[in-house]
Image: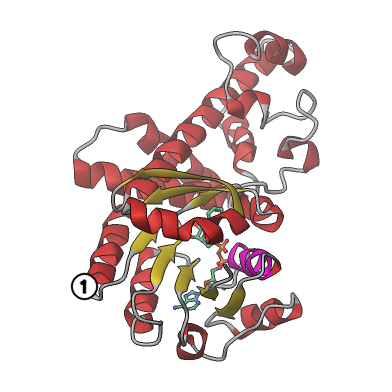
Amino acid sequence: KPQRVALVGLGNMGRPMAVNLAKAGHDVMGFDLSDAARRQAADAGIAVAASLREAGQGAETLITMLPAGSHVLSVWQDAFTHLSPGALMVDCSTIDVASARAAHELAAMHGNPSLDAPVSGGTKGAAAATLTFMVGGRVEAFERARPVLDALGARAVHCGEAGAGQVAKMCNNMILGVSMIAVAEAFVLAEQHGLSAQALFDVAATSSGQCWSLTSYCPVPGPVPASPANHAYRPGFATALMLKDLRLAKEAARTAGAATPLGAHAEAIYAAFDAEGGGGDDFSAVIRHLRRQMT
Ligand code: NAD
């Protein structure tokens, strides 16, 4: 059954998500603090409110798609009084685990069911409604969110209690960030010894070095024609976003006392590449940084 949904944060991800929710028949009202984002969303055909209050009025579901934990906590705090009683709160942003848990506590205090539901699939997945949701929170809240998540993505995995979605997301992206550097290092080493990229690919893609960073997202042009390396490293998944996720992983490791030495080293390497101006390039362009390190 169609729902009245308020979607707050109409940026690169939130805008196409709002479009898809409306397409699926939901009654969507969007809001963003930025005039430019509100204008762009209206141009895309989304009903846009002038305030959080107007967007939230009577909504049965609130979706937030915001940059960081502080934004999510402040929007949720302000939204409770406007939403319909018992409205479902769903945060799809990628944020720190502590803020995600604090948001769940805030919702519970107001009697609202809540989910942390970060996504993978990027802006392409948001536009094509093929996102994957990694979801933390009560199973009843997860079931209630189904119609909305189904309109936005291809898959939703219930990972566990409050914060579990964020933990799953940062663990996955830590694997990705580390494995991309490992693959890029191997191509640089091969290059320096005169081994062709194609030969290394042909061996490793069917050997124990096989991984997604190699076979789906190869950081050198040629072997995987669709990978960003073939398109001037246009993202894709920008280095700045990978860096954000690795910082969240490091913070989560620190608070839990987990040892993640390669995650921390990967963060330092992407940070160095970002400082060289690579933040807007796809993260697989980190191979350029490695080439610059050659002695
Ligand atoms: P974005 O910067 O394009 O959009 C965020 C929007 O939030 C901006 O338009 C900003 O004006 C708005 N905003 C900030 N504070 C607000 C407030 N208090 N009230 C209302 N609006 C407010 O970012 P994005 O690329 O859409 O990413 C959103 C989230 O999704 C982030 O947490 C990001 O890490 C995550 N994510 C992004 C991608 C991607 O490929 N872009 C992929 C996966 C996850």
Say which quadrant the N terminus sits in. Answer: bottom right
Quadrant location, the C terminus: top right
Question: 30 above or below 276?
Answer: below
Q: Is residue 35 above or below residue 151?
A: below
Q: Which residues are magenta?
A: 13-22
Q: Position of residue 42 (x, y in %)?
A: 70, 81
Residue 119 pos. (x, y %): 51, 51
Question: To which quarter of the image does residue 43 belong?
Answer: bottom right
Whether residue 275 can be seen here: no
Viewer-proximal residue among 63 and 271: 63
Q: Which residue is mark 1?
A: 109
Residue located at (58% from left, 70% from top):
2
Amino acid type, mark 1: Met
Q: Quadrant of residue 10?
A: bottom right
Residue depicted at x 47% and y 80%: 59
Q: Nearer the viewer, residue 37 or 84?
A: 84
Q: Quadrant of residue 114?
A: bottom left
Which of the pair 153/270 is nearer the observer? 153
Above or below for 151 versus 266: below
Q: Is residue 137 above or below residue 43?
A: above
Q: Secondary structure at mark 1?
A: helix
Does the segment drawn in magenta span residue 278? no
